[in-house]
Amino acid sequence: MSRSYQPDRRHLLLAGAVGAAGMSFPTIAAGQELTPTPECRDEHDATPRQSEGPFFKPKSPLLSDLRQTGLTGETVILTGLVLTRDCRPVANALVDLWHADAKGDYDNRGSRGRGHQFTDAQGRYRFLTILPARYTGRTRHYHVKVQAANGPVLTTQLYFPSEPGNARDPLFRRELLMSVAPGGAERAARFDFVIGRA
Ligand code: FE
C-alpha cells in the first residue's frame, strides 16, 4: 500500500501501544476451539482487494455513526469482525468506510458519508450509516480500508445481495457480499474481513 494513506494520530498511538504489548493473543490450549464465525471456519483466504476508486479522501472523522455527517436515507447497521487468516480477532484495527449518499453522490469537499473507527478487543467494528444509491456504471456498494496496527492496508468494496446491478458491474465479486437481514426499518449488514498478520 502506498505511503499516501496515513492513519491518524490516534491510530499511530494505538499502534505503538499494541506494538509494545507484542500484539500477543491468548494461546489456545490443545483441544480448545475458537467459536467459528460464518466467514472463517478454517484457514481462510484473505478478503479480496479491490480498487480504491476516485472518491477516497484521507483523514476521515473518527465516527461510528456516519449519519452524523449529514447523510439521510435508509439506515444500515454494518457490523463484523477483523480476523487473521487463522481466524483470530484483530484488536485496534482501523476500519475506514466511505460511500455514496442516497442520491449516488460522494462528498468530495467535506466528510459526508466518510468515517473510521477501530476494532475492539474482540476484533469487532460497528457502523451506523445509510443505504447508498447506485450510480452510473456501478452497483450498490461501500468502500472500505482495513489496517491492523503496523500492517498493510486492505482496500476493498462491499456489495449487497439480491441487487440486480451486481451482475452488470464488472467489479462485483461474490466473496465481497455482505449478509443483510431482510426487511425492517434498519437493515443489519454483516461482513468479516480476513487480513494477513502484521
Ligand atoms: Fe464507489
Image (cartoon, grey):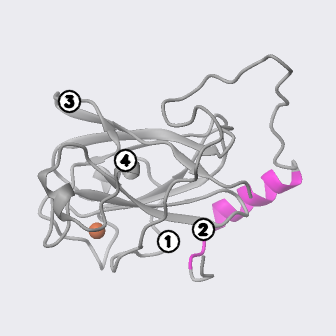
Q: Which of the marked residues, 1 or 3, is nearer the chain's N terminus?
A: 1
The three-letter amino acid code for the residue at tag 1 is Lys
Measuring from the top left, give residue 107's x and y in whole percent.
26, 72
Q: CA distance from mark 1 to mark 3?
A: 33 Å
Say whether residue 137 is left or right of residue 190: left
Q: Identify which residue is drawn at 27% across, 30% down.
A: 181
Which residue is located at x 41 percent, y 73 percent?
A: 52
Q: Position of residue 57 (x, y in %)?
A: 42, 76
Of discs 1 and 3, which sits in the foreground? 3
Look at mark 4 in the image and give the residue it sits on. 65
Q: Nearer the viewer, residue 185 or 47?
A: 47
Seen at 66% across and 49% down, the residue is 92
Magenta span covers which residues?
5-20
Where does ligand 1 appear, by image quarter? bottom left
Above or below for 159 versus 111 = above
Q: CA distance from mark 2 to mark 3?
A: 36 Å
Labels 2 & 1 near each other (Cβ < 8 A): yes
Main secondary structure of the magenta stretch: helix
| Separation of residues labelled 4 and 2 (CA atoms) | 18 Å
Using the numbered discs, state the Cα–Cα distance from disc 1 to disc 4 in whole angstroms.
16 Å
Q: Which residue is mark 1?
A: 59
**Labelled pair 1, 3 in contact (Cβ < 8 Å):** no
Q: CA distance from mark 4 to mark 3?
A: 21 Å
- The tag earlier along the polypeptide, 4 or 3, is 4
Task: Report the disc number at residue 8.
Answer: 2
Question: Which of the 4 image quarters holds residue 41?
Answer: top right
The residue under label 3 is: 182
* Rendering coords of residue 1 (x, y %): 60, 76
Residue density around tag 2, few if under 14, some if 14–19, many if 20 or more, within 10 Å: some
